[in-house]
């Protein structure tokens, strides 16, 4: 399967071509170059998936194939390799990334039409796609880190695409700084891993582990911090909502389907290590994910910017995936059993389903913003009459994320909640409550956009209209996947048959087929329907007296949630009032007065000494002879005396 190398080469060549020659290309040509290259990548990815999943298994297990590998930097016993590793989760990620990226490329033809820097935009999209593809097919952890950083650079460039807008500049710097801070821990973890394992590969050196097994939990937790930063887990989540300052297709690509799941993918890739050497540390993943899911859902309930609602929804859903991985152990046991397999499968399955319906939601939000020229729900209302395709696709995606049967989100989220209950009833009910909040805030968003009070004054100046085909076609494709996967897995789960979407190869190499826990499935569905009914009661009408009464009853709570519980202000206080004022300033004073002063003293001393001894270089032959004669006499006297 050496042809898989072209999956990385094509977007890289597209990036180079558009980056170097883009200024001489028209918008149309640049768009076609980027889109056709991604189309070829998508075709190759689907061929790879079909070939891989239809191939014969080895002892009933899908094989791990190294399609390409070469040593990049040899460093004694350690070496940095570059290659392509194919196994069930990397092949699945090829499908996710190529599908969503292709939809975004097609969608951008309409959304970014006429934008200055159109060629640069498509070049950055190609770079980002190549970086994410290289991350998921990495043969070793160092290659993963290399492409991990390229993903960070790409996100910085895309978030700051509107570089003349101060908010976009600030958001891109914020994303870059926060994720680089987290990546520092990832790098330290990799160095500890390499030191004790004598390798950066995913094939583990047991002898090295025996020597330093006590350090591996530390290394894995440090790597998890890096993943938490990339996946916007609390308290490293602050960059993601502001990243919505980039173009909306960028939000769909980076912050809904690919980049933010890199942390989840990292945990899944290293999962055999977690299970064998750090099972107790998985509780950190569980509780960080559980708290993040609740926090983000609470904030999403109060946001008025539709992209920020979706951003906090993304944080909450990524936290669901983290929790599913963390609960893979039922308490204290150190081996994967059926419950562990369920959690691992559920996390990866939810990664797939969430990518599709969340990308659809973001692209739908882009159509809405394109129609009303505003992100605020106050500028919307009643848009179902003007945008029927966007309305239907958005509704389907809301039903999917709410966990309604026959939509893909139901299948994956139900499996996560089942795994949580197997781990702990407390975690199970906690995540059930978060799922209920998800259904509530998504239908609050839906009614605020498509129902509610129509802004007739705004619409009089600019009548909303449906987006062009280049923008609605990706919505339809993503919705078909969402509904198709949902029907297939829902029926398959209840009727007892699985299939390509109804089963998943877990971390221990066994095939796990979806089998719903009927009680949990019914409970979660009823709770989701109650949440939707509550949102309908409060927000569907043109006037919203219940919402007004709730706001008047709890204004402070609403304000705190709207301000994200003042986490940005906390960071500002810590950085400016504590770090800058009481740590950075003393260090700067020490640098200026002590370090600089010491070197200034050396320069002054050297200059003064040179001034004093300049007579020795006067050029007078008589003076040189005199000094030479005195020196000889002193030397003779020294010899005679001693």
Image: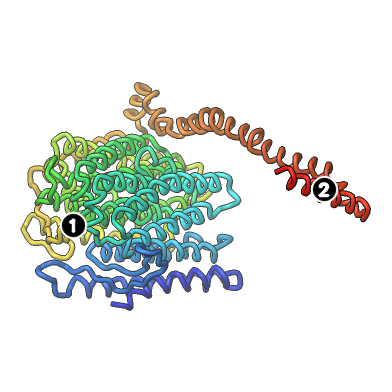
Q: Residue at x 80, y 40 (%)?
A: 608
Q: Nearer the viewer, residue 284 or 427?
A: 284
Which residue corresponds to mark 1? 507
Q: Residue at x 31, y 38 (%)?
A: 292
- Spatial distance from mark 1 to mark 2, Cα to Cα? 88 Å
Which residue corresponds to mark 2? 633
The percent coordinates of residue 492 (x first, y second) are: 11, 59
Relative to 240, is 66 on the left or the right? Answer: left
Q: Residue 54 sits in which quadrant?
A: bottom left
Mark 1: few/some/many CA within 10 Å (<14, 14-19, 20+): many
Relative to 229, is 16 on the left or the right? Answer: right
Q: Residue furthest front?
A: 640
74 up-or-down from 447: above or below? below
Q: Nearer the viewer, residue 228 or 256?
A: 228
Relative to 590, is 412 on the left or the right? Answer: left
The percent coordinates of residue 93 (x first, y second) are: 29, 62
Quadrant (top left, top right, bottom left, bottom right) of the N terminus: bottom left
The percent coordinates of residue 404 (x first, y second) are: 20, 48
Label total for image: 2
Residue 628 seen anywhere in this rendered image of the structure: yes
């Amino acid at each position: 399967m050496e042809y898989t190398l072209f999956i990385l080469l094509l977007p890289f060549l597209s990036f180079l071509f558009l980056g170097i020659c883009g200024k001489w290309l028209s918008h149309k040509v640049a768009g076609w170059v980027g889109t056709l290259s991604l189309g070829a990548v998508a075709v190759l990815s689907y061929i790879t998936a079909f070939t891989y999943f239809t191939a014969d298994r080895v002892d009933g297990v899908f094989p791990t194939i190294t399609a390409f590998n070469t040593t990049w930097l040899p460093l004694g016993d350690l070496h940095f390799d570059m290659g392509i590793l194919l196994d069930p989760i990397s092949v699945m990620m090829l499908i996710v990334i190529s599908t969503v990226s292709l939809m975004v490329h097609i969608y951008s033809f309409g959304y970014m039409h006429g934008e200055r820097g159109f060629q640069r935009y498509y070049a950055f999209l190609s770079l980002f796609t190549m970086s994410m593809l290289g991350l998921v097919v990495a043969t070793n952890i160092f290659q993963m880190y290399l492409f991990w950083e390229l993903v960070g650079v790409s996100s910085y460039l895309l978030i700051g695409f509107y570089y003349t807008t101060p908010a976009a500049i600030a958001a891109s710097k914020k994303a870059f700084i926060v994720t680089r801070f987290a990546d520092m821990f990832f790098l330290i973890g990799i160095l500890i891993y390499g030191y004790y394992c004598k390798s950066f590969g995913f094939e583990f050196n047991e002898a090295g582990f025996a020597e330093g097994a006590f350090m591996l939990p530390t290394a894995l937790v440090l790597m998890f911090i890096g993943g938490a930063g990339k996946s916007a887990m609390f308290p490293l989540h602050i960059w993601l909502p502001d990243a919505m300052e980039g173009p909306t297709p960028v939000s769909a690509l980076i912050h809904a389907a690919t980049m933010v799941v890199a942390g989840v993918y990292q945990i899944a890739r290293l999962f055999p290590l977690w299970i064998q050497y750090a099972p107790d540390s998985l509780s950190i993943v569980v509780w960080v994910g559980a708290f993040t899911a609740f926090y983000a859902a609470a904030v999403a309930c109060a946001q008025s910017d539709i992209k920020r609602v979706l951003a906090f929804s993304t944080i909450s859903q990524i936290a669901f995936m983290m929790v599913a991985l963390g609960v893979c152990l039922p308490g204290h046991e150190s081996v994967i059993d059926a419950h562990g397999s369920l959690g691992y499968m559920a996390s990866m399955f939810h990664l797939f389903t969430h990518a599709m319906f969340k990308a659809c939601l973001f692209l739908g939000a882009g159509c809405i913003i394109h129609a009303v020229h505003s992100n605020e729900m106050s500028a919307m209302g009643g848009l179902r009459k003007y945008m029927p395709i966007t309305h239907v696709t958005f509704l389907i995606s809301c039903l999917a994320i709410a966990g309604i049967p026959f939509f893909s989100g139901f299948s994956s989220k139900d499996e996560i909640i089942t795994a949580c209950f197997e781990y702990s009833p407390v975690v199970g009910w906690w995540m059930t409550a978060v799922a209920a909040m998800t259904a509530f805030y998504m239908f609050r968003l839906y009614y605020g956009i498509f129902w509610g009070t129509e802004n007739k004054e705004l619409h009089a100046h600019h009548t909303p209209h449906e987006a062009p085909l280049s923008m609605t076609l990706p919505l339809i494709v993503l919705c078909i996947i969402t509904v198709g996967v949902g029907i297939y897995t829902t029926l398959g789960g209840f009727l007892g048959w699985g299939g390509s979407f109804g089963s998943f190869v877990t971390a221990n190499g066994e095939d796990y087929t979806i089998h719903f826990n009927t009680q949990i499935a019914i409970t979660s569905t009823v709770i989701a329907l109650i949440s939707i009914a509550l949102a309908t009661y409060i927000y569907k009408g043109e006037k919203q007296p219940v919402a007004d009464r709730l706001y008047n009853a709890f204004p402070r709570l609403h304000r705190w949630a709207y301000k994200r519980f003042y986490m940005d202000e906390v960071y500002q206080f810590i950085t400016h009032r504590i770090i800058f004022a009481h740590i950075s300033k003393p260090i700067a004073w020490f640098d200026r007065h002590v370090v600089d002063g010491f070197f200034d003293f050396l320069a002054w001393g050297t200059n003064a000494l040179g001034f004093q001894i300049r007579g020795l270089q006067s050029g007078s032959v008589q003076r040189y002879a005199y000094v030479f004669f005195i020196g000889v006499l002193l030397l003779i006297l020294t010899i005679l005396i001693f």
